[in-house]
Amino acid sequence: MANLDVTVRHSGINFPGHLHTLKSLESAQTFKFHDTDTLIVTYPKSGTTWMQEILTIIYNDGNPQLANTTPNWLRSPWIEHYYCEDVVMNMLHQRTLTTHLPYHFLAKSLKQSNAKVIYVARNPKDIIVSFYHFHKMANFLPEPGTFGEFLEKFVTGEVNYGSWFDHIKEWINHRDEHNFLFITYEELIKDLRKSVIKLCNFVEHPLSPEAIDTIVRHCTFANMKENKMINYTLVPNEIMDQQRGKFMRKGVAGDWKEHFTEEQKQAFEKIYQEKLSDSNIVLAWTL
Ligand code: PPS
């Protein structure tokens, strides 16, 4: 399926038609989770691929072989993508799944299982920058226009996948549930080893210090950037134009400082305070 210019609209949110159909979005809402599933939840550009890579190697006891030989979309498929059913059919044991969907799409299904949920959050200003550059290379997303124009669309929730504010507000309400882990991209950047240990504890998959060392070595930005199984160079240029950017772009916290003008920063922070003031979000990043 290419459908590069198709947009699918569901419940007021736009999704790229290259990966979604109305049917696949409906199916995701009735997805049958197993108690042994681990679901990675992210707003795009928050550290999805990083978490997919870490969990793949945790569940393989520190052995990176699967991560080096199988694309991430086959080992941790997005449950809302049209191909998910076929992939999931062949997943026999522990399943690591991924979603960018808002909580209300999945609430009913999730409540019927004890699946573990890992929500990865990232400083929204860095998400905007990463998403902006991704729009330039991903031909299944609309042209982003100038950075200022894209920022405006992000703030109003007109971008594909909807409003980041709504996404985090809905999911974070569940952070105290026993099967829910909230972790940030910034925590991974700050101390990857500590984060891997935290993840091992959460998914109840303890590993030796040597296995943890292997994961930390494998999951550095420099190493992952070269891994064809996650850097999307396997995807045809017509879909992701590697001349216009790289999926594994910079991998840092705070790149927003290179993109936001002082005026844009102030305006965004004001909106951030307004939109999130009624929620108890204590976030690890300093805006
Ligand atoms: S997507 O399209 O939603 O699946 O994208 P996602 O994987 O969530 O986010 C991509 C950004 O994550 C960065 N990334 C990493 N940063 C640091 N270390 C590691 N190992 C790593 N792996 C992925 C990737 O570079 C994108 O961020 P930017 O800021 O664009 O570099």
Image: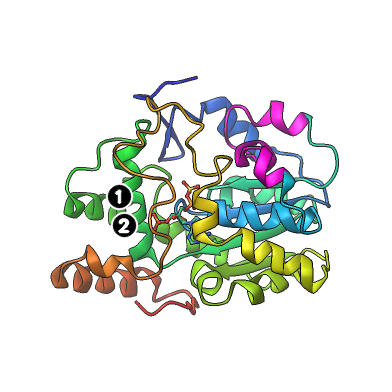
Colouring mode (rainbow / by chain / secondary structure / one colour): rainbow
Residue 78 seen by the camera: no
Quarter of the image holding residue 165?
bottom left
- The verdict on residue 85 being magenta is yes
Badge 2: how crowded within 10 Å, few (<14), some, or many (20+)? many
Q: Name the residue at 49% across, 58% down.
A: 222
Q: Is mark 2 within 8 Å of ligand 1?
A: yes
Q: Which residues are magenta?
A: 66-89
Q: Secondary structure at mark 1?
A: helix
Q: Are marks 2 and 1 in contact (CB under 8 Å)?
A: yes
Along the horizontal axis of the image, is 97 left or right of 164?
right
Residue 70 seen by the camera: yes
Residue hosting label 1: 132
Badge 1 amino acid: Tyr
Residue 191: x, y in percent?
A: 57, 76
Vertical arrangement, residue 172 with respect to residue 103, above or below: below
Observer-nearest of 179 and 26: 179
Q: Secondary structure at mark 2?
A: helix
Residue hosting label 2: 129
Residue 276: x, y in percent?
A: 40, 71
Q: Name the residue at 54% across, 53% down.
A: 224
Badge 2 amino acid: Val
Q: Which mark is residue 147?
A: none
